[in-house]
């Protein structure tokens, strides 16, 4: 994978080329302080000699929605409380005082959320924080506020990889630190999208050689019967829209097939490297002659073909459960969601 190939797969690069054929998206440049926040790096201006706590950004309005406390859990002592008599001024700060604030970005993000219908899916240049979906109240990447977005991004290993290691995998990577500009992309949220209708297309030497079901952790009975309908739609879209617009020769493109048989671009990824081959193996896709007899289209044909899902675990930082911490925010949101569901169930029974 060459650096130029990876850079072409950044959403802020390909979105203008495919704007009529993809999901409506707003992109916002990220400042160095916000990037340091996402990486959990200390502020260079701070005198603190310990790693920063995971706190959600302080609202631009200045109102602190969380109680002021500094209770913490020591991750090395079976979740026993830390000594509260610390001499550090930073430890005595309330969450509202210690939390960072990014008012300009928050204001821009909130305007975009409103313009995109009230809910968005966030991602950076390459990745979305799918591995952090566990922390949202409904287990999805749906965000309705800047705090929702910050919580997902700060919790994701995929996002950390984008920020610190993406270009290091390139065969022509420079020894100097990369100077990539990072963007937050907010994509309009569609609650009715069907995961079985998303597919990964493998393009080799500008030829579509293979198509895979994108969500490989579930068997969708409709797919084996509809392969013969879906494949020509994707092939026609690739030949008419994608082939001449995208600059790389080798890459993957994820597409979505709508109920009225239109095809939409979801994302681009580099060939190989950290891109998952899904129903294929990179070794076979790289073989000379693969796909010469036609596009290979694979879906899960039965329940026995289901693949393992993405493994997730609670990040080490989340052992800090003090009020104002990321873990505390997760528990608060989960409790709110359970209360909402209980009210909905009560109303439904009452209507009956």
Image (cartoon, rainbow, N blue to C red):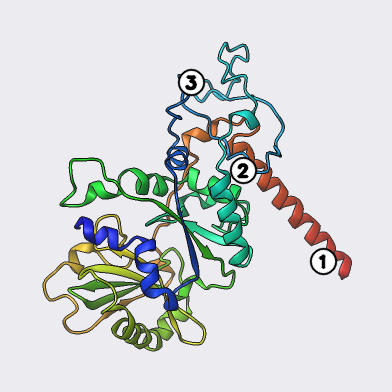
- Tell me residue 216's x, y (percent): 40, 66
- Tell me residue 294's x, y (percent): 22, 84
Q: Which mark is residue 63?
A: none
- Dividing the picture into quadrants, the one containing residue 94 is top right
Q: Which mark is residue 48?
A: 3
Element assignment for label 3: loop
Q: Residues within 10 Å of mark 2 (few under 14, many from 20)?
A: some
Q: Marks 1/2: CA distance?
A: 27 Å
Q: Marks 3/1: CA distance?
A: 52 Å
Picture residue at 83% right of the left edge, 60% below the top: 346
Picture residue at 54% right of the left edge, 57% below the top: 141
Q: Which mark is residue 330?
A: 2
Which is more toward the observer, 228 or 320? 320
Left or right, residue 196 beside residue 13: right
Q: Say which label, 3 or 1, has the lower sequence index.
A: 3
Residue bearing mark 1: 348
- Tell me residue 140's x, y (percent): 56, 58
- Dividing the picture into quadrants, the one containing residue 63 is top right
Picture residue at 18% right of the left edge, 84% below the top: 293
């Amino acid at each position: 994978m060459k650096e130029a190939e990876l850079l072409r797969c950044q959403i802020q690069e390909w979105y203008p080329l495919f704007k009529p054929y993809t999901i409506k998206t707003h992109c916002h440049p990220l400042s160095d302080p916000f990037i340091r926040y996402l990486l959990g790096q200390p502020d260079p201006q701070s005198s603190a000699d310990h790693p920063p706590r995971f706190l959600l950004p302080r609202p631009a309005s200045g109102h602190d929605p969380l109680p002021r406390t500094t209770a913490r859990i020591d991750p090395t002592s079976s979740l026993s409380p830390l000594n509260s008599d610390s001499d550090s001024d930073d430890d005595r700060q309330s969450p509202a005082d210690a939390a960072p604030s990014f008012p300009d970005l928050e204001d821009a993000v909130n305007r975009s959320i409103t313009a995109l219908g009230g809910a968005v899916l966030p991602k950076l240049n390459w990745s979305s924080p799918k591995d952090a979906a566990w922390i949202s109240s409904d287990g999805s990447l749906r965000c309705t506020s800047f705090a929702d977005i910050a919580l997902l991004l700060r919790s994701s290993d995929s996002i950390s990889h984008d920020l610190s290691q993406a270009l290091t995998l390139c065969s022509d990577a420079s020894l100097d630190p990369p100077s990539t500009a990072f963007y937050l992309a907010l994509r309009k949220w569609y609650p009715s999208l069907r995961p079985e209708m998303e597919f990964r297309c493998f393009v080799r030497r500008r030829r579509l050689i293979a198509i895979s079901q994108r969500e490989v952790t579930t068997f969708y009975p409709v797919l084996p019967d509809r392969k013969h309908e879906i494949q020509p739609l994707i092939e026609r879209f690739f030949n008419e829209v994608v082939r001449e617009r995208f600059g790389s020769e080798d890459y993957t493109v994820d597409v979505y097939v709508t109920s009225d048989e239109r095809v939409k671009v979801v994302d681009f990824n580099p060939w190989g490297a950290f891109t998952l081959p899904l129903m294929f193996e990179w070794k076979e896709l790289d073989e000379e002659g693969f796909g010469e007899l036609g596009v290979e289209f694979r879906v899960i044909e039965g329940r026995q073909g289901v693949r393992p899902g993405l493994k997730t675990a609670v990040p080490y930082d989340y052992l800090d459960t003090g009020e104002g911490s990321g873990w505390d925010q997760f528990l608060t949101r989960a409790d709110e969601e359970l209360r909402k569901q209980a009210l909905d169930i009560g109303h439904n029974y009452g209507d009956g």
